[in-house]
Amino acid sequence: MECREVLICLWEYLDEELRPEQAEAVAAHLSHCGACYPAYCCDRALLDLLARQRRACSAPAALLMSIRIHLKVS
């Protein structure tokens, strides 16, 4: 897998949305590519930060209700 391909599917990789063979190819590339690995680290750090913030504060109930209504989710 080449750098361009890895960077295109990096978010899907981080979200574990790739097929197993694709995920393995991305992981193998990241293990030896000094150009792509920093991008992976940056995106991973952003996701980790967002997860910590989500645990630290929650959305107001009225906002959650409004989003659910607009998405038609019960």
Image: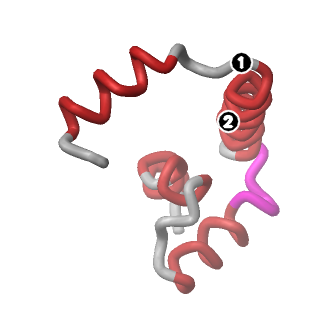
Circle 1 or circle 2, nearest the eye = 1
How is the structure coloured here? secondary structure
Residue 74 position within the rendered picture, expressed as x and y whole percent measured from the top left: 30, 48
Q: Residue at x 76, y 35 (%)?
A: 48
**In this picture, residue 22 sits left or right of residue 56:** left
Residue linked to disc 2: 47
Up-down relation of residue 40 to residue 18 (above or below): above
Residue linked to disc 1: 57
Q: Amino acid at mark 2?
A: Leu
Label 1 – label 2 distance at C-alpha = 16 Å
Q: Secondary structure at mark 2?
A: helix
Q: Main secondary structure of the magenta part?
A: helix
Q: Residues within 10 Å of mark 1 (few under 14, many from 20)?
A: few
Quarter of the figure with residue 69: top left
Q: Amino acid at mark 1?
A: Cys
Part of the protein shown in magenta: 30-34
